[in-house]
Amino acid sequence: MDYSSLGKLLRSAQQDEAEAKRRRLTLYFISYVGGTIMAFMAWLNVGTNNPLLVGALTISTVVVYANVALSHVFPKSDVCYYIGGLIVLFTINVLVYTGGLNNTGLYFIYPLLFVQIIVVRFKPAMLYVSVTMGLAVVMLFNQGKIDAQYPDEHVSRFLISTFCFICIAFIGENFWHQSRKEMLKENLERMRQANTDPLTKLPNRRFLEAVFFEKAMQDPAAYFPLSAVVVDIDHFKKINDNYGHDVGDQVLIHVTSLMKEAVRSSDVVARTGGEEFLVLFPHATLTQAVKLAEKMRRLIEERPFVAGDINHPITASFGVATALTDTNLHASLKQADDNLYKAKNAGRNRVME
């Protein structure tokens, strides 16, 4: 996992929790309240000479409740939000076409448009509102083809006020999104610093426990089987004693680059402390993980650390284990750590499973 991927995962962890909750609760509130209001309005119009309005409001109510029920079943899907936007499009244009109760349908356009703007994502909402109002404008200027009849002065004032309302609503939403983006950017940088090892720029133990493992537990299908490889640089203390800690730091950076070169883009290389690293292979069996660990071992052995007059061979020991499901993740991490000690006790510079 490169630095940009780390940022992406941190960003998704941060955004998923706040933004998804806001949109989901907004959809729930609007759907239950809006569906109830439409059902009430349909009931008020029963017995009037407007069966089209009654039928359309009834259909909208049923679809609204069905859509919110679907959103409870699939809370992570965006489809329900776009369906909500289409329901609003349909309802608005039915109100314009029929005129609503006593030709008062235009009064309900404003809250419905606002619902469309805040439920659908910002950029798609522009398209939704444009199509919705485009159809409404066509009907308002071709009243001979619709049931409702609106005075010309009402049409002009309605369109001007609606245009102003749409502009203000989108400006408000835009400023909200921009301010939130700035806040997320600042929080992301703080999270990056807190979750990154300053020397190697690798994710640290905090990142693994607070972000990566949390995401894996929430979405096991995207990560398991998850193989773990604990890596320890052999005789690292001697490097520090012989050359100093500055050279030791350079060796850590050198080994980091070699491990990142050996793994896949989806894998995570983290520094867990001192000369110890943890490499995580999502969707990798034990056999695959052992092969990848052996690839790292050979690469480290074949590429000695060279700096000035220093040419020091480097080796590392590896402990491998695989968690088939999220229920045995921590047990597998402990097993990988135990296997590392077996590799060190067996003579170092080897992979143990």
Image (cartoon, rainbow, N blue to C red):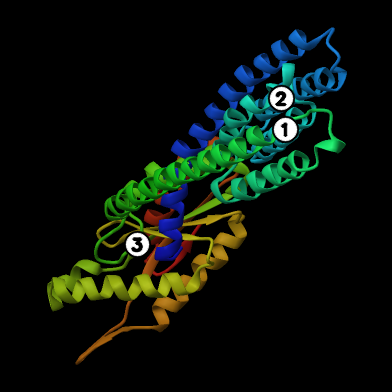
Q: At which x and y percent is residue 200?
A: 29, 66
The mark that comes first in sequence, 2 or 1, is 2
Q: Does residue 337 lie above or below 68 as drawn?
A: below
Q: Nearer the viewer, mark 1 or mark 3?
A: 1
Q: At which x and y percent is residue 329?
A: 50, 41
Q: At which x and y percent is residue 273?
A: 27, 55
What amino acid is labelled 1 in the image? Ile
Left or right, 218 with reference to 277? right
Determine whether label 1 and label 3 are within 8 Å by CB.
no
Is residue 156 visible in the rendered image? The answer is yes
Residue 64 - label: 2
What amino acid is labelled 2 in the image? Val
Q: Does residue 142 lie above or below 270 as drawn?
A: above
Q: CA distance from mark 1 to mark 3?
A: 47 Å
**Secondary element at tag 1:** helix
Left or right, 309 with reference to 180? left
**Secondary element at tag 3:** loop
Residue 202 - label: 3
Left or right, 225 with reference to 47? left
Which residue matches tag 1? Answer: 87
**Secondary element at tag 2:** helix
What amino acid is labelled 3 in the image? Leu
Residue at point 35%, 62% (across, down) = 202
Q: Nearer the viewer, mark 2 or mark 3?
A: 2
**Crowding near pointer 1: few (<14 within 10 Å), some, many (20+)?**
some
Residue 116 - label: none
